[in-house]
Image (cartoon, rainbow, N blue to C red):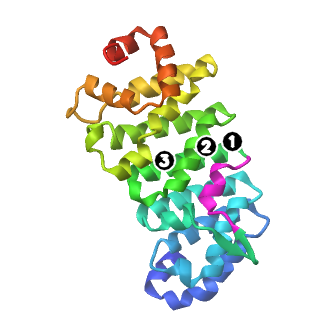
Amino acid sequence: EAVFELSGAAPKCLTGVLGAYAEDLTIEDDQLRIKAVKLLGAVFAVGNYHTEFSQAFSEFKRRSVDKDPDVRKALINVMQALVDKRGEMGKILMEDEWNYMGGSREAPLLKLVIDIDEGVRKEAVAAVLSACLNNAESVPHSILECVAERVMDKKPAVRKQTMEGLSRLWQKYCAPSDAARLPQSIADRFGSIPSRVLRLHGHDNATRQLVMSCVEDICLSPLNDARTGAEVALHFYSSLDLGARENLAALLKLRSRFCEIFVKFC
């Protein structure tokens, strides 16, 4: 807290202090590395310290390959807070490649979305989708595409996180408006979500139940009363590709409620 206050009151004094905390990012104690990640994240949320202290910022981003999953999870939470506070940080942390010791590295959040650890992947997916729900412009299209691929993740928990999060994006940005009136930027980013969700129909029964829940309880539940359920259902159906429409037809055979909503459009 004292170091964070120092960043505002006497920024020139930070040079030596931040150097010391950057060194803490590489020590053996996992808990101290987590504390250093949180502190540096708070400092980088102010001014241009991420460029003025580029070496510390590079070591901060390099925690995306930290040996301890808890440190990587801490970094995810801190980076999400940074993007929520400063939308321009989204491109830096989610898309831009960066150099370390002469080598090119992936953007830290982009790398964490495909992390080897299930829990890390799940939190990274949640962080990106939450940031997008908060401010769509802060999240680059490239990482959103990478996150959308997690609907095919081998772990059910990651698939669930991805499908529900994508469904909420469609619910917020697409469901409230007629498809013909959607801005092209919104249609390009989120218009394919229904097809991605329905891509999973052929999986196990639990996953099929999840698909139906995402469609019924999220996609077809508008956040306001501007459109009727039938209007939203027609919009949803019209956005599906051929494979997704076939999967929807199979779901209709399983659920009478689906039939009631969709029968006039199928």
Find out whether the residues at labels 2 and 3 contact each other: C-beta distance under 8 Å.
no
**Residue 72 in the image: above or below residue 166:** below
**Residue 246 in the image: above or below residue 105:** above
The residue that appears at 47% across and 62% down in the rendered structure is: 83
Residue 176, given in percent of the width and then of the height, sits at: 27, 38
Answer whether residue 137 is magenta in the image: no
What stretch of residues is rendered in magenta? 105-116
User: Tag 2's secondary structure?
Assistant: helix
**Residue 240 in the image: above or below residue 19:** above
Residue 1 visible (yes or no):
no
- 39 sits left or right of 116 in the view: left
Find residue 129 and name its label.
3
User: Tag 3's secondary structure?
Assistant: helix
Residue 227, given in percent of the width and then of the height, sits at: 22, 31
Residue at the limit of the structure toward the left, as seen here: 226
Find residue 118 and name its label.
1
The residue that appears at 43% across and 67% down in the rendered structure is: 86
**Residue 231 in the image: above or below residue 116:** above
Residue at the limit of the structure toward the bottom, as seen here: 12
Q: Amino acid at mark 1?
A: Glu
Of the two numbered discs 2 and 3 on the same chain, state the one appearing first in sequence.
2
- Measure the alpha-carbon separation of dots 1 and 3: 17 Å
Q: Amino acid at mark 2?
A: Lys
Find out whether the residues at labels 1 and 3 contact each other: C-beta distance under 8 Å.
no
Residue 194 visible (yes or no):
yes
